[in-house]
Image: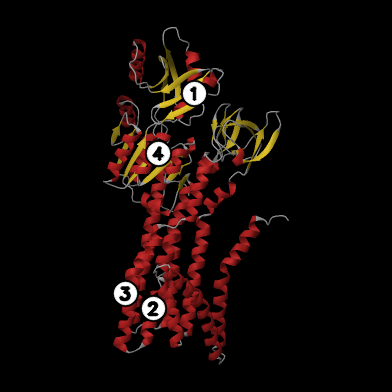
Amino acid sequence: MRPQPEASRRRRGSWWLWTPLTGLTLLVLAGAAVRPAGLPGVADALWAVATLAALLPAAVAVLRDLLRRRFGVDVIAVLALGGALVVGEYLAGAVVAVMLATGRTLEAYAQRRATRDLRALLERAPRTARRRTAEGAVEEVPVDRVAAGDRLLVGPGDVVAVDGVTESAATLDESVVTGESRLVERAAGARVASGVVNAGAAFGLRATESAERSTYAGIVRLAEEATARRAPTVRLADRYAAAFVPFTLALAGLGWVLSGDFLRAVAVLVVATPCPLLLATPIAIVSGLSRVARRGVLVRDGGSLEVLGRARTLLVDKTGTLTAGRPRVADIVVAPGGDPDEVLRLAASVEQLSSHVLAAALVRAAGERGLRLVTPAEVTEEPGRGVGGRVDGRRVRVGQFAGELPQWAERASRRAGAAGHSLVWVAEVTGPLGAVLLEDPVRPDARRTVARLRAAGLTRIVMVTGDRPEDARRVADAVGVDDVLARCTPQEKATRVRAEAGRAVTVMVGDGVNDAPALAEAQVGVAMGATGATASADVADAVLSVDRLDPLADAVEVARYSRRIAVQSATVGMGLALLAMGFAAAGRLPPVAGAFLQEGIDVLVILNALRALRGGSRGPA
């Protein structure tokens, strides 16, 4: 059977969404039509049926919650509907029923509208890949059977299933992952993130990660969590119930006792139904989640977005965030009698499986020189210190060197320091074989991005890095951060984040395995996911799907705006409801008028919450 077109599924889903509201509305309108015709009993019967149709499922839900020892504001709706039936205010009860159905319908519509960008990510997740066999044939396999080292064929229009390195030039559409609509050209040997689309001819890809550990899989996991979790502002509704429900019952009882008219108590209950709190706040927060996803920032849940909206301090790693993130080899210094190409070949071979940006620079430089790389054995990685492995029987370590440096190495270190270059040592157990000098220029837009982050509300920006103080200070002065912490180990980064988080709501941005402890310590950890840093993404609260920092400024602005809209909607809605309750307790607002008034308040605050789908950011919508 052919699947239904997407438009047909959407229409069917929309009809199902509106059916309860349509049925209740027809009952109310039918009653209104027959009453002037001299059939008040029929009209009351129709309105009573509508009231009962809303009361029964609401009562079951409240009873279920009470059995689970949960006490929420839904109890007020049940009391309002039941009270309307008891006193014979059938029209008021029917209007409350329509009000509840309207609220649920608008909430469902807003959730569908607000999460459509997140759902699009889930629907695009690749299911299969074309893998080359040892005999040279091509077989289609499920993506979960692809392993690092497999050679794949990516056809025209295919979604890249796993992170990998191109075996030939490729033209890619990276808009779904990065948010940028223009096509990009990737040369042979370039790293490609999963989730991008082949916009040109077929090309070969050597997998560097399994599908589960690839960039797009991490983004999909975040999207699933973002659509499944509720914002804390929704859960706050139940906390408010501890005060709001007793207050409502007390006010209703007081109006009844002082006047002797039970109708006043029913009127108070009718206008007390707190739909603004239950519906408006989650709509605003989920709308914010959708908008930041559109800008290339995947936030794990509404709680993280709400906290991001209160952030004041930002700690950011240097390499790949404030700098270009694509270091290039500036020079190679070797021990007397050594061969620069051999030192680079050994280093690049060991670093082939690493996702760090410095590793990519070594592999890229080896490819440009036409060096033959081999697959390393016994590979180990120590976050913040380097990678080791066996290449052609030689035990090679690439990264920092802790021993005493020979004279030639001392000169290389001073030379790197004077030029502001990073230094990667290539060593055996007997000592260093050589050093690779890498330069990573400051991003041209870094200073402007830092200024945008300040404008978004971040009052303190600190750069943390494992580089030397001189290099770190040079970058810090160029971009305009408030403080810098150099020669920082992963543990020291985590300690600094913990200290900053004790003073203000803190965001930490990192792009490597060594940043994972610090991301876990921050109130909001943000991983640079475009580089495939899966360890960081797994503990982060948000992932930047591009290798730039400026989308974070968009996310902070949207988070602040969404939070402000959520609080505004709840405050205004509840304030209006409390005012109406006072008039109802004084006998100035009968149940029918109160029901219509509460319906208007609900629609008002929900429409206000939908404003979170637009505005609040200087970036594109």
Residue located beneath label 3 in the image: 247
Q: Please name the residue shown 44% across and 53% down the image.
A: 288
The label nearer to you, 1 versus 2, is: 1
The label nearer to you, 4 versus 2, is: 4
Q: Quadrant of the N terminus?
A: bottom right
**Is residue 326 in view?**
no
Residue located beneath label 4 in the image: 516
CA distance separating discs 1 and 4? 22 Å
The reply to whether callout 1 and callout 2 are in contact (CB within 8 Å) is: no
Disc with the residue nearer the chain's start (4 vs 2): 2
The label nearer to you, 3 versus 4, is: 4
Instruction: Return the mark for residue 476.
Output: none
CA distance separating discs 3 and 4? 46 Å
Q: Residue 14, position in %: x, y?
A: 59, 64
Instruction: Return the mark for residue 350.
Output: 1
Q: Residue 96, position in %: x, y?
A: 46, 77
Disc with the residue nearer the chain's start (2 vs 3): 3
Residue located beneath label 2 in the image: 269
Q: Residues within 10 Å of mark 2 (few under 14, many from 20)?
A: many
User: Label 4 amino acid?
Assistant: Ala
Q: Residue 95, position in %: x, y?
A: 48, 78
User: Label 3 amino acid?
Assistant: Phe
How many numbered discs sit on the rendered protein? 4
Q: Is residue 1 left or right of residue 315?
A: right
CA distance separating discs 1 and 3? 68 Å
Q: Residues within 10 Å of mark 4 (few under 14, many from 20)?
A: many
Q: Residue 264, position in %: x, y?
A: 36, 84
Disc with the residue nearer the chain's start (1 vs 4): 1
